[in-house]
Amino acid sequence: MPPEPARSVRATWIYTLVSIVFFYGFFDLIVGLTLFEASLAQPTPLVLAALVLHVLATAAQLRYCWFLHLGRGGGLPHPAWTVVLLLPAALVWAIGLLAPGLALVSAMPLWAALTLVAPLLPKPRRGQLLAVGAAVTAAHVFAAAWLHGGAETAREQSSGWMIGFFAVMLPIMALTSLWWWEVVVRLDRNRRTAGELAVTQERLRFASDLHDIQGHHLQVISLKSELAERLLERDPERARELVHEVRLIAKEALEETRSLVAGYRQVAFDQELENAREVLAASGAVCTLRLGPVPSDDEVQRVLGTVVREGTTNILRHSEARAVTIELVTRDGRSELRITNDGVAAPSERGARAGHGAGSGLDGLSERLTAIGGVLSTEADAAAGSFRLVASVPMAAGVPA
């Protein structure tokens, strides 16, 4: 199942849809007013039928605009919708050949319907349909003028140029609007891909660190265990020493692994900030750093670096952030790290718990901060769609809050 598009993409589609509907609606209004004027001057059943059918054709066109979200070449919807779109327009087209004075306006509903169908077809068929539609429209105007004489177009002259201009612009507007929306969709997909790649790179970095820690220890454990096995009968005392060394190495490997997972390995705070900025930039967000004095205590810096790393991961996983601000403010002997982002889709995503136990996610962060006398809090603004992670720490580890 493909991921849900970003809210900005959905908003762009709504804007595009409204623009298309407005353009077609305005065009149909001009045609409808011209038909209404003709019905007042010549209230025959054919002209009245053309006016009613045009209203139905207009409603079908405005509804059919929704299917354009499939994009250019996206394929037609259920055939019934296309029949509903083309049938009343084709009847107006036919009436225009029978009733005088409707040479131009009676050809427009069918042309507008065809310009809505064309974008959904593959490119070669799209051009063919538009060419056939233009030929049928021109042939209708000339045929109606020939059947009823040139005088019947006099009533249309006041709006003829406007109708002709909008008729030419219909396919151009529809295709360019869809092209622009497709560009936005493609950019959103690239943004998601960049974010996923950034997370993958972080996982690879973690895997590399874990391999560096475990690879050497496991190799030594394997060699010493093999040697101890060989010495069990010949030199039990030496074998016992080797087994003891294996136990110490395994204990050391376990401690270093726990240290890595808990985020206690020495990573410079400024390096974590630069990593966060690069990862967020790769996902399409603008990261702004506002840094005051940095605590000199190494333990405090490690924990703040962990807060930056975990906050960045949560932003990538649980939001569609376009702007992120990381602030470090120092006052009254304490430092406060604030990570603020927009793009929070729903209140349910606030403070998402990414971890599955102690040592990971926001719960793990809270425990680490508490251990050095710090406090973790979150603030969410549902109206603005923003989320803030605040970590308050003492200037030195162990100082109470």
Image: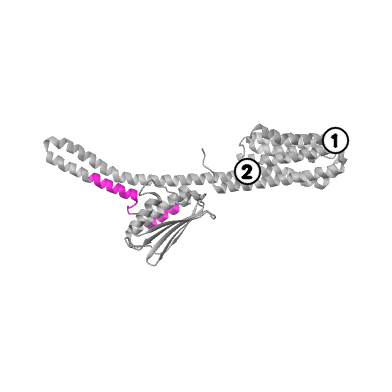
Q: Is residue 283 visible?
A: no
Against 293, residue 44 (above or below) is above
> What secondary structure is found at the residue carrying circle 1?
helix
Amino acid, disc 1 = Trp
75 falls in the magenta region: no
Q: Quadrant of residue 145?
A: top right
Q: Quadrant of residue 182?
A: top right
Against 38, residue 300 (above or below) is below
274 falls in the magenta region: yes
Label 2 Cα neighbours within 10 Å, binned few <14 / some 14-19 / many ≥20: many
Proximity of marks 1 and 2: CB atoms separated by less than 8 Å: no
**Which residue is at a point 23% across and 41% down the rendered structure image?**
221
Residue at the farthest bottom position? 332
Where residue 383 appears, as percent x and y from the top left, is: 54, 55
Q: What segment is highlighted magenta in the picture?
A: 249-278
CA distance for labels 1 and 2:
38 Å
Main SS of residues in magenta: helix
**Which residue is at a point 81% across and 44% down the rendered structure image?**
36
Residue labelled with disc 2: 178
Residue labelled with disc 1: 146
Query: Looking at this view, is 350 or 114 the one in front?
Result: 350
Where residue 371 appears, as percent x and y from the top left, is: 33, 56
Amino acid, disc 2 = Leu
